Image: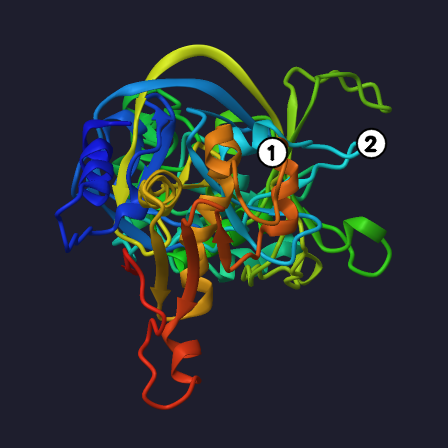
């Protein structure tokens, strides 16, 4: 235990103290390696650099304030996920997971998962993580209209404020809120280049360092220089509002994207792809899609020779995702109809690795969950109270009712107690109705227990205010009373 946890444990179990008030003990004491990236409302930070006052995100997409940072300790377990993410933690770190045979979600520690089968015989993964809601960043004042930037990133001239498209796709240009200064139609291909010189587009591209020197116009005439530029998605767009990010995504899909037909492509129905040779741009697109709560898959195709004999010089990257929200594309053939698919990120493997330094943070939201890793994995903090209650019941033979506003809340602490009973024989010796407990798997039949009794007289049970109110009029909330009463 950390020093803070030891203080909590000692205070709860110390004789002579009649009242203990603990503020949010469920969010203290579990550990993630320092070098794990965490997305904050101001951009990415390493977990070890998080400070009180930073805002991270929970799986519901809402910012949650960091209100505590624990001392450093060791992370020596790596948890791998089905999307390729790997997070280093300690064995006590908590996760909100659902077993495919469970009806609901439970908080379990890494040690619990290490002692369970993570895959069935057919290879299917057993434990899955909760789906992520779109992250709620605030609306930003952007240098370039987001749809326009998406279209330029897809079909724009890297060194100039120009976009080249086929004439039939003119609707893309019509959706851009900047005035076209000139049009150039290629004599052979018929492709049209639309120039946006002397507009906010050129100013914005320079401000964002997407173009450092512009080609064409007076600059070319004066310096004989064709310009410099690079395509990527600036951080201010990655951390913009949901509406601004889907508009940028729409511009990219209309130019560099492809939308599968929803009538004749089977499992690919409606799947969206963005295709590009620029790896950084593809990775940036993946950041945008993940922040909108959708799963991403990236496939690399090595440069080769086409059927027409054209020799490719660059590898091609295909980014694919199932759109689960409205993306306002303007090309009819790229219309996106949202489809909610029950695809979850699952735990793939857990193994011990070389120890690294890490620590725990304490967050403000009620469930203690926050997102970690570049691929935004939901992770959870925990509580020390359950261990103190288990100690009092087993070694002090006390009667302990746990009372909460609802039955579900009351059972939260009991779930932790049930998880820790197998830790040591003394904790389950004399446990009535569970004699000879020597395997943690036996707790599966007790996961919903409301009462634990030991032959020595110790007793833990859960109750709720609602259930007691349904009892006979005049009966107290706790009714039978107890040596130690926990009010959640």
Q: Which mark is residue 51?
A: none
Of the two numbered discs 2 and 1 in the rendering, the one whose residue sits closer to the viewer: 2
Residue, disc 2 = 121
Which residue, as the protein is rendered here, is positioned at the far front? 456
Label 2, residues with CA under 10 Å away: few <14, some 14-19, many ≥20 = few
Residue 257: give x, y in percent of width and height: 63, 45
- Residue visible at 75% across and 51% down? 260
- Residue visible at 57% across and 57% down? 448
Q: Quadrant of residue 487?
A: bottom left
Q: Is residue 191 visible?
A: no
- Residue visible at 67% across and 54% down? 342
Q: What colour scheme governs how the chains and residues are painted in the rendered image of this protein?
A: rainbow
- State the SS at label 2: loop
Residue, disc 1 = 83
Q: Is residue 309 above or below residue 59?
A: above
Q: With 304 as the anchor, is 218 left or right in this view?
A: left
- State the SS at label 1: loop
Instruction: Choose the circle earlier in sequence order: 2 or 1.
Output: 1
Residue 131: give x, y in percent of width and height: 54, 51
- Residue visible at 78% across and 49% down? 268
Number of labels in the image equals 2
Which residue, as the protein is rendered here, is positioned at the far top? 354
């Amino acid at each position: 235990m950390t020093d803070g946890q030891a203080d909590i444990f000692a205070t709860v179990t110390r004789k002579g103290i009649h009242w203990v008030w603990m503020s949010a003990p469920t969010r203290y004491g579990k550990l993630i390696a320092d070098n794990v990236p965490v997305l904050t409302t101001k951009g990415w930070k390493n977990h070890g650099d998080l400070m009180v006052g930073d805002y991270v995100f929970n799986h519901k997409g809402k910012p949650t304030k960091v209100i505590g940072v624990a001392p450093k300790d060791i992370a020596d377990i790596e948890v791998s996920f089905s999307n390729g993410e790997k997070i280093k933690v300690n064995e006590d770190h908590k996760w909100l997971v659902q077993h495919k045979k469970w009806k609901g979600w439970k908080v379990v520690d890494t040690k619990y998962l290490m002692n369970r089968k993570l895959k069935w015989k057919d290879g299917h993964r057993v434990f899955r993580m909760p789906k992520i809601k779109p992250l709620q960043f605030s609306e930003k004042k952007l240098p370039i209209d987001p749809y326009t930037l998406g279209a330029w990133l897809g079909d724009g001239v890297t060194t100039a404020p120009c976009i080249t498209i086929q004439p039939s796709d003119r609707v893309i240009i019509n959706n851009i809120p900047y005035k076209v200064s000139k049009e150039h139609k290629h004599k052979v291909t018929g492709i049209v280049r639309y120039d946006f010189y002397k507009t906010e587009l050129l100013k914005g591209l320079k401000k964002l360092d997407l173009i450092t020197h512009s080609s064409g116009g007076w600059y070319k005439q004066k310096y004989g220089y064709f310009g410099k530029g690079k395509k990527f998605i600036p951080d201010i767009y990655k951390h913009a509002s949901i509406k601004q990010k889907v508009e940028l995504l729409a511009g990219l899909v209309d130019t560099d994207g492809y939308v599968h037909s929803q009538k004749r492509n089977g499992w690919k129905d409606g799947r969206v792809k963005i295709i590009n040779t620029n790896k950084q741009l593809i990775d940036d697109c993946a950041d945008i899609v993940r922040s909108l709560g959708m799963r991403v898959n990236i496939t690399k195709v090595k440069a080769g020779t086409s059927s027409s004999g054209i020799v490719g010089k660059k590898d091609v990257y295909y980014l694919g995702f199932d759109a689960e929200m409205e993306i306002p594309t303007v090309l009819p053939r790229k219309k996106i109809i949202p489809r909610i698919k029950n695809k979850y990120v699952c735990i793939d493997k857990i193994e011990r690795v070389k120890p690294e330094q890490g620590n725990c943070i304490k967050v403000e939201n009620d469930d203690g969950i926050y997102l970690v890793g570049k691929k935004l994995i939901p992770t959870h903090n925990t509580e020390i109270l359950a261990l103190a209650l288990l100690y009092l019941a087993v070694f002090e033979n006390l009667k302990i009712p746990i009372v909460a506003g609802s039955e579900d809340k009351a059972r939260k602490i009991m779930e932790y107690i049930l998880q820790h009973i197998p830790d040591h024989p003394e904790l389950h010796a004399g446990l009535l109705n569970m004699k000879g407990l020597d395997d943690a798997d036996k707790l599966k039949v007790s996961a919903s227990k409301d009462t634990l009794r030991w032959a020595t007289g110790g007793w833990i049970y859960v109750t709720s205010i609602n259930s007691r109110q349904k009892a006979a009029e005049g009966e107290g909330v706790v009714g039978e009373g107890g040596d130690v009463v926990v009010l959640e």
